[in-house]
């Protein structure tokens, strides 16, 4: 076997291979591993917004029943091991090293055009670790799309489609209907599917697909009641929880009242309206990364804080329509701080500051920082308990960077 010490570095370097939709490479890779996916029983979740939250709720409730669970999500915020969780815990470094080394050994002799992508390798790693850990039920979040996503090789108990919006149009198509067809690709003949409220164009595609393959279809029409404790903030999370519970039940599981209460109350999903206290200041981290999720974040802020303003730290990827996102968030802000996201795809904060969002309007004049660290130091590195809470949002990459900085020596966060 190849040395463990280089395994994760090797895997992360494969991100340079880019995105290449298709299942041939994934199927070959899984075959070389002995097809671990065939031994799994999976709940598969696709959609544009809320996938991770639905997965987190479903896994938490299943675990509260006493089921030995696996959870696969992306991206990770701080540690790679966040992507693959077994019974609520990140897999160990030793498991990751051993699994990656096996993948590297399997693929090292393959031709360049046969090499799996980063996401395919990570998904195969997850399937292998879940299988070796004898997970009874695995909850899977799709990566990109659904039909040609590496997770679509899984054996499924039930599926769910969260709200579909325009995103990744370069891969999935430029209309809601085209994107919906890609998401609907996770459906299987006779396997039940749970569908969140959708735009009419999306609903038509999903209903037609389910009917064509005789997949029992359940539409979620109401959120869980507001008097039920839920570990996630925001009315939209009650819709996500309703989808998750319908998904569990569609797969044949019926939690007791105690297990349901425990699973909903204890669910935690980092970077989704996550509250921290830093040196007396209140900091909320939210990975809203497109206009739809920014709109929902604004609603959640009003639900939680009323008319109280925030000090907004914003950074986004250039392909996510930062101006449209900011237009949803600026009414919340007494001050606006624009930063670069630690990604080659980052939008230029100086261009945002000089763009249409701030031209000839009464919005606060933004302050631009060259790094997130500089912005956090200015806003948090003093006693600011009397000032407005800080809302950091625009990208999960930005939230991940913030959590990394806040876990260091400069800032010592205390989760609320």
Image (cartoon, helix red, strand yellow):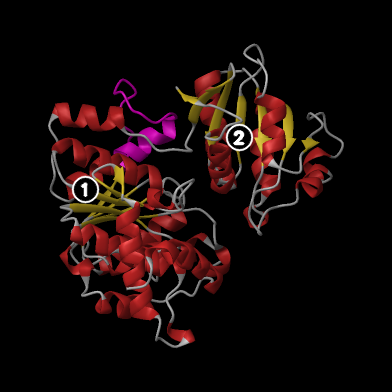
Give the total number of marks visible in the rendering: 2
Q: What kind of element bears circle 2?
A: strand
What residue does disc 1 label? 69
- Main secondary structure type of the part rendered in magenta: loop
Q: Residue at x 64, y 51 (%)?
A: 342
Query: Is disc 2 in contact with disc 1, using a CB cutoff of under 8 Å?
Result: no
Residue 3: x %, y % from top left: 38, 68
| Front residue (pair 385, 293) | 385
Dot 2 or dot 1: first in sequence order is: 1
Q: Which residue is drawn at 82% across and 28% down?
A: 362
What residue does disc 2 label? 392
Work out which quarter of the rendered image holds the C terminus and state it.
top left
* Snapshot quadrant of residue 279: top right
Q: What kind of element bears circle 1?
A: strand
Q: Is residue 60 magenta?
A: no
Asked if residue 394 lies left or right of residue 149, the reply is right
In this picture, which residue range is highlighted in magenta? 220-243
Q: Which residue is drawn at 57% across and 32% down?
A: 409
- Above or below, 45 against 214 in this view is above
Asked if residue 31 lies left or right of residue 310, the reply is left
Crowding near the residue tagged with mark 1, few <14, some 14–19, many ≥20 C-alpha atoms within 10 Å: many
């Amino acid at each position: 076997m190849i040395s463990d010490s280089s395994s994760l570095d090797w895997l992360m370097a494969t991100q340079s291979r880019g995105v290449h939709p298709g299942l041939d490479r994934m199927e070959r890779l899984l075959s070389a591993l002995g097809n671990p996916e065939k031994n799994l029983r999976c709940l598969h979740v696709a959609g544009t917004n809320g996938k991770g939250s639905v997965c987190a709720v479903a896994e938490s409730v299943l675990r509260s029943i006493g089921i030995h669970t696996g959870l696969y999500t992306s991206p990770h915020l701080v540690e790679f091991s966040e992507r693959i969780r077994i019974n609520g815990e990140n897999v160990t470094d030793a498991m990751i090293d051993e699994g990656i080394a096996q993948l590297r050994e399997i693929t090292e002799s393959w031709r360049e055009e046969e090499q799996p992508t980063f996401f395919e390798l990570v998904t195969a790693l997850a399937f292998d670790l879940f299988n070796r850990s004898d997970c009874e039920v695995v909850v899977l979040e799709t990566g990109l799309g659904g039909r040609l996503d590496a997770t679509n090789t899984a054996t499924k108990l039930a599926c769910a489609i969260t709200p579909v919006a325009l995103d990744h149009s370069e891969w999935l198509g430029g209309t809601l209907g085209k994107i919906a067809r890609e998401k609907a690709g996770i459906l299987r003949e006779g396997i039940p599917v749970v569908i969140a409220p959708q735009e009419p164009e999306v609903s038509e595609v999903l209903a037609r697909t389910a009917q064509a393959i005789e997949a029992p279809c359940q539409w979620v029409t109401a959120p869980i009641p507001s008097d039920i404790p839920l570990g996630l903030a925001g009315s939209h999370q009650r819709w996500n929880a309703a989808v998750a519970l319908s998904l569990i039940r569609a797969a044949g599981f019926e939690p007791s009242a105690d297990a349901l209460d425990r699973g909903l109350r204890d669910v935690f999903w980092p970077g989704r309206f996550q509250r921290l206290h830093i040196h007396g200041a209140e900091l909320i981290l939210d990975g809203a990364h497109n206009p739809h999720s920014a709109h929902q974040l604004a609603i959640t802020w009003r639900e939680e804080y009323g008319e109280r303003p925030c000090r907004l730290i914003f950074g986004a990827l250039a392909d996510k329509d930062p101006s449209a996102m900011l237009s949803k968030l600026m009414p919340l802000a007494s001050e606006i701080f624009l930063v670069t996201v630690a990604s080659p795809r980052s939008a230029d904060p100086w261009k945002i500051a000089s763009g249409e969002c701030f031209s000839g309007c009464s919005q606060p004049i933004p302050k631009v920082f060259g790094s997130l660290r500089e912005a956090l130091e200015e806003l948090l590195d003093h006693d600011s308990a009397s000032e407005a809470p800080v809302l950091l949002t625009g990208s999960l990459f930005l939230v991940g960077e913030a959590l990394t900085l806040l876990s260091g020596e400069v800032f010592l966060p205390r989760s609320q």
